Every structure is written in structure tokens, then in C-alpha cells.
Image: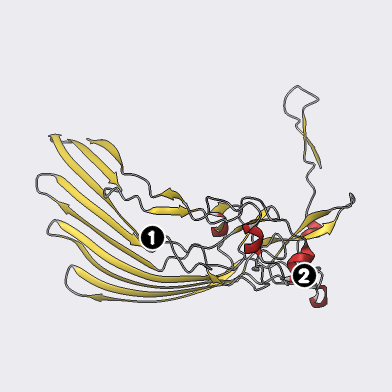
Amino acid sequence: MKTRDLIGVNPHRASWNDRTQSWDTTDTGLKSVAQTEFSLGAEKKVSEEMSLSGRFIYKHLLQTIEDVGILEKNPYGGESEQYYIANPGMGWVLPVSKGGKFEARFWESPKAKREYYGINLALEKRFSNNWQGGISYTWSRMTGNYGGLSSSDEGGRNSPNVERYWDLFYERYDLHGRPLDGVLPSDRTHCFKAYGSYAFPFGLTVGVVAYGRSGLPLTTSLSFNDMQIFPDGYFDTGKRYPFLFTMDLYLEYNLRIAKKFTINLNATIFNVTDTDTIQGYYQRPNYKTITWTQDQILSKALNWKDYVATNEPDPRYGQWTSRYGPRSWRLGARFSF
């Protein structure tokens, strides 16, 4: 496709788009991303200023859109990745025997799965007698094989619908040939939140927000054929990052200078507790990328642990890589007249 810019005096000014169109690699029966959701809640008035509430939420992913890849022979005698824009586990990416385009010898593309269950309990007091506050607790569980449009497999990478989830036939499997299906990398079992503020009669308002939450699951990953895989499935270690607790503090003071002129001075102190809880571990045991053929992968007969032990294991494995950010603050001023 060629387009010309007719604006201006330069007759040679033009632009081209030489990118290959993907009409022949987009499933003609493609379905839109969809999920179902069910929620049930109730709220009870405890007093004139206080209420107690509870809520249950269930979310079920029906299907998503992703680029699903396969290795195909190229004109140079090697293999290249060919991607199809499709619904994983449906249509074109199924085996030929089921109406798809993939060879039967490959592990079948599993459907995208994400199940979320959550229960939230909250006790809140509205502002009266110069103060307000509340406390809440959420228990939740997120399982499946698909983290969403922002890939939790890749640390939150944002490439919607073209992540690395299904780029090759074995990526949604462990190295034993079992489909991935377990606690997702973004799962947090317990979350607590408490907040409150008090307005002093001389113009000062003090507010706090405190958080407590379970750590994310720890899952072993491998550098494998120039990509990442989970050789023993999600949450194979059975361990999580440490529980995190932190608190933010807010201060605001209103100073009236004249009848219609007020200065508002405020300060926010983030992580006032100076929490430095570990937020990242190096979870990849191999320094040298493992390169195995498709036939070797399909055999399910290779032991990755023995291979890594004798082929440059990474000394960083199991070491922490990041901690929660240090205490910081922000100052502000606002004039009203």
C-alpha cells in the first residue's frame, strides 16, 4: 500500500507501509473476548454512622484473543514462528482432525482459563464528630493459565492480545506435558485495608491508610528456546513472597489569611513505616538458555534439573532482586480566594 502526501510543495514527499497483512492468519471465526461475572452483596446498618457490608464475586473467562504460534519450515531450510490471531483452544489452532490447522503430534492448544473468587467484608464509619474510618478484608483466589491483557507471566508486560502465552505449542504446558492450570502469578490470598482521618478544630486534618497483603506465588521459570516456560507448572515451590505491611500518612492544614483568602498546606508521607519487604526473587535457575528440539520436548523424557546442574546454573537463583520502595513524601500548597 502506498499513500502520498499532497500537502506542501515537495512533490517527492511520500510514505509507504510495507508491513505484511495478516488476513490469511486471522481466524475467520474469531470470537470477541468475553467473561461472565456473578456478584452478591449485602449491607447492614449497625448505627447511625456505621455500616457492615459483605460481598461475594466470581469471574469466569469465556475466551480471549491471542497470537498462537507454531514452527514452520522456511525457504532457507530452517524453521520460523508462524502466528495465528485466534481464540486459544478454538478454531484454527486446534488439530487438523478437529477442523484446525495444527499438526496432531503437537500438544493441543488449551483454552484460556482464568477463574476469580473473592469475598470482601468491610466495616465503615461515615464522617461525624470530626472523624471517619473503616477496615476491610478480602480473601481471593485466581487460578487458570492466563493472567490477562497485562501478562502476569512476564511481570506485567503490556502487549494486549499478543503476549507470550501461546507463542509455541508447549508454552501453556509444563515439561511433563501437563497443561498449566493453577494459582496464577498475580494471586494474593489475603488483603487487609484500614483507613481513618480526624479533623482538629484548629484546622489540621490527619489521615492514615494502612495495607496488609499476602505475597505473590513463587514459581520456577526457565530460559528455554529464547523464551520463558514454567517447567513444573505454576506455584511449584508452594512458597510466596513475604507478607507486606505498609502505611501512608496525610496531613492537611487550612490557614485563613483574610475573609475570602485561605492557604491549604498539605503533606503526604508514603510508606511511613519505611517497610523494605522483599518484592522480587530471581526465579530462573539456568544462566545458559536451554535449547531442545520439538521432538525432545514431545518425548517428555528429559530432566531439566539434571541438565541445569551440569550446564551453567545461575548463582543468582533464589536471591532477592527488589524490595518495597523506601519512605518518600510529597508537599503541596493550594490558595483559595
Q: Label 1's element?
A: loop
Residue 306 spot, x, y in % from top left: 64, 63
Residue 164 spot, x, y in % from top left: 65, 57
Q: Residue at x 61, y 55 (%)?
A: 160
- Name the residue furthest top: 9
Q: Amino acid at mark 1?
A: Pro
Q: Above or below — where is 292 with respect to 57?
A: above
Q: Residue at x 49, y 56 (%)?
A: 318
Which comes sooner in the sequence, label 2 or label 1?
Answer: 2
Q: Amino acid at mark 2?
A: Phe
Residue beneath disc 1:
242
Q: Above or below — where is 47 with respect to 267?
A: below
- Residues packed near mark 1 inside 10 Å, few (<14), some (14 to 19) or many (20 plus): some
- The answer to which of 277 and 162 lies nearer the viewer is 277
Residue 219 spot, x, y in % from top left: 53, 63
- The answer to which of 229 and 195 lies nearer the viewer is 229
Q: Label 2's element?
A: loop
Q: Residue at x 80, y 54 (%)?
A: 80
- Residues packed near mark 2 inside 10 Å, few (<14), some (14 to 19) or many (20 plus): some
Give the CA separation, mark 2 to mark 1.
39 Å
Residue beneath disc 2:
106
Q: Is residue 324 left or right of residue 249?
A: right
Callout 2 touching callout 1 (CB < 8 Å): no
Q: How is the image coloured?
A: secondary structure
Q: Is residue 271 left or right of residue 29?
A: left
